[in-house]
Each structure stands twice: as C-alpha cells, then as structure tokens.
Image (cartoon, rainbow, N blue to C red):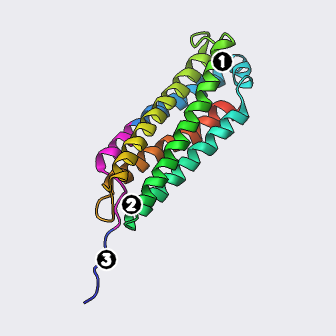
Amino acid sequence: MAERAVAPRLAGDGIVWLLVLAELLTFGLLFVSFAVARHLQPAVFAPGQAALSLHTGALNTLLLVAASWAAVRAVRAFEADRGDLGAHWLLAALAGAIGFLVVKTHEFVGKVQAGFDWATNAFTLLYTLLTGFHYLHVVVGAIVFAVLWRKARSGAYGRSHHMGPASGAVFWHMVDLLWMVLFPLVYVIR
C-alpha cells in the first residue's frame, strides 16, 4: 500500500507563532521609529552610532547564528530519536545565547561607565529600547534552552515528541532575525 503524503506544517506550536508575530510587529514599530528619527536628526544619530563597536556587533551576530544552527541540529537529533545528541546541541545553543549576553553586558557596562544616559536624546533612547528589549528576548531564549536541555537530559524528547524544542527553536530564530535587522540598522547604516 502506498504511503500517504503528509502535508507540510510549520515547526513548533501555534501559540509560539502568535507570539512571534506580536514581537515582530512590536520590533517593526521600533525599527521604523529608529529609521525615521535618524533621518530627521542625523546630527544626533551620527556621533551615537559612531561610538558603537562594529566588532562587538559582528561577534554577537556570529553567536546568535551559531545558537540558531545548534537549535536546528537539536530538533533534527530529536526527530531522529537521538536524544543525547539533541541535548548536546541544546547545550551548544545555550552557550551561544550566554555568549551573546556576556558580550552585550560588557558593551552596556562600558557605555554606562563612559557616562551613557539613555535619556540624553533620540538616539540614546531608541538604542536603549531596541538593544535592551532584544537583550531581554535573548535572556528568555537562554532560559528556554536551559529548560529544554534539562528535560532532554532526562529523555523527554524523541521522534514522536519534540514540539517543545521545535517551538524553542522558532522563538530563537525570531530573536536571531530581529538582530539581523537591528545590527545593520543601529550599528552599520549611518
């Protein structure tokens, strides 16, 4: 008897996709606000953006992309009933998230020590809102990876049960995508 074709479906739970949509709309408004304010006040934005480190932003990009890749590898491992391997990949994704947080925290601390005030002007306010809000999303993603990793170590995921890791990966890909817009918009395009 011939196998029936399985209709393709989105990875993860439907609720995570509603969350992703809401977050993308929220960040979209912030991105547009930043772009419009930069257009209207180039003299305010130019020195603020010039003080940002492209190297730090690029390193954070690599950490986020590596974590996304590890999250995909984890889901694929669970789909293949290789739970131990999936747990290792989740740990790698967690390491990427923590690496981002360490680098970004170092950047924030350096700015504060240099006298950075989030309410100085439109640039400092929007920079703080965008990067701070994104930072909080990375914290949530790291917590999700840690919880998934803990459950994976006890054998909770496999071929027939990997919705949790798939939903976590979807959330993380959103975090990664947001940075892919945030980094060029805030750090690169001047």
Q: In front here: 27 or 159?
A: 159
Q: Which residue is at a point 69% across and 20% down the rendered structure image?
A: 48
Disc 2 + disc 1, Cβ < 8 Å = no
Q: In front here: 112 or 18?
A: 112
Q: CA distance from mark 3 to mark 1?
A: 55 Å
Residue 103, numbered label: none
Q: CA distance from mark 3 to mark 2?
A: 26 Å
**Residue furthest to the left:** 1
Magenta highlight range: 8-22
Q: Which residue lies under the disc numbered 2?
A: 83
Q: Is residue 166 magenta?
A: no
| Residue 172 x, y percent position in the rendering | 46, 44
Q: Which residue lies under the disc numbered 1?
A: 111
**Residue furthest to the front:** 154
Regarding residue 146, the answer to whether it shows in the image is yes
Comes first in the chain, label 3 or label 2: 3
Element type where label 1 sits in the image: helix
| Residue 152 x, y percent position in the rendering | 36, 52
In the picture shown, does residue 18 fall above or below 103?
below
Element type where label 3 sits in the image: loop
Q: Which residue is at a point 49% across and 59% down the rendered structure image?
A: 73
Q: CA distance from mark 2 to mark 1?
A: 42 Å
